[in-house]
């Protein structure tokens, strides 16, 4: 109501979203770094498979 009144706009809506706190995990090896990044971005898995990449 506060925003609607002060902005003089009855169509203003606000949604609040609270995200869960992320764990602070440190990756040590290249494989662990890859695992953490792949969790966040599935396209990384596709790139690895498509180009036949491996970790040494």
Image: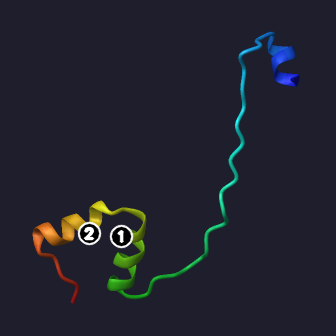
Q: Quadrant of the N terminus?
A: top right
For the residue carrying disc 2, how many other residues have a C-alpha within 10 Å: few (<14), some (14-19), or many (20+)?
some
Describe residue 25's horizontal placement relative to residue 7 as left or right: left
Residue positioned 34% across, 76% down in the render = 34
Residue denoted by label 2: 45
Q: CA distance from mark 2 to mark 1?
A: 6 Å
Residue positioned 28% across, 60% down in the render = 43
Where is 4 relative to 33, above or below? above
Task: Report the coloring of the rendering.
Answer: rainbow
Where is 47 relative to 24, above or below? above
Q: Measuring from the top left, give residue 23's x and y in whole percent.
A: 61, 75
- Specify which label sits upstream in the sequence, 2 or 1: 1
| Quadrant in which residue 42 is drawn | bottom left
For the residue carrying disc 1, how many other residues have a C-alpha within 10 Å: few (<14), some (14-19), or many (20+)?
some
Q: Measuring from the top left, give residue 20's x and y in whole percent.
A: 66, 63
Residue denoted by label 1: 38
Where is 44 relative to 53, above or below? above
Q: Secondary structure at mark 1?
A: helix
Q: Quadrant of the C terminus?
A: bottom left
Describe residue 46's horizontal placement relative to residue 30 as left or right: left
Residue 46 numbered mark, or none: none
Describe residue 40's horizontal placement relative to residue 7 as left or right: left
Residue positioned 86% across, 15% down in the render = 6
Describe residue 41's horizontal placement relative to residue 43 as left or right: right
Residue positioned 72% across, 32% down in the render = 14
């Amino acid at each position: 109501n506060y925003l609607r009144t002060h902005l003089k706009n009855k169509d203003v809506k606000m949604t609040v979203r609270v995200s869960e706190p992320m764990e602070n995990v440190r990756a040590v090896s290249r494989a662990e770094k890859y695992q953490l990044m792949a969790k966040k971005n599935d396209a990384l898995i596709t790139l690895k498979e498509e180009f036949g990449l491996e970790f040494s």
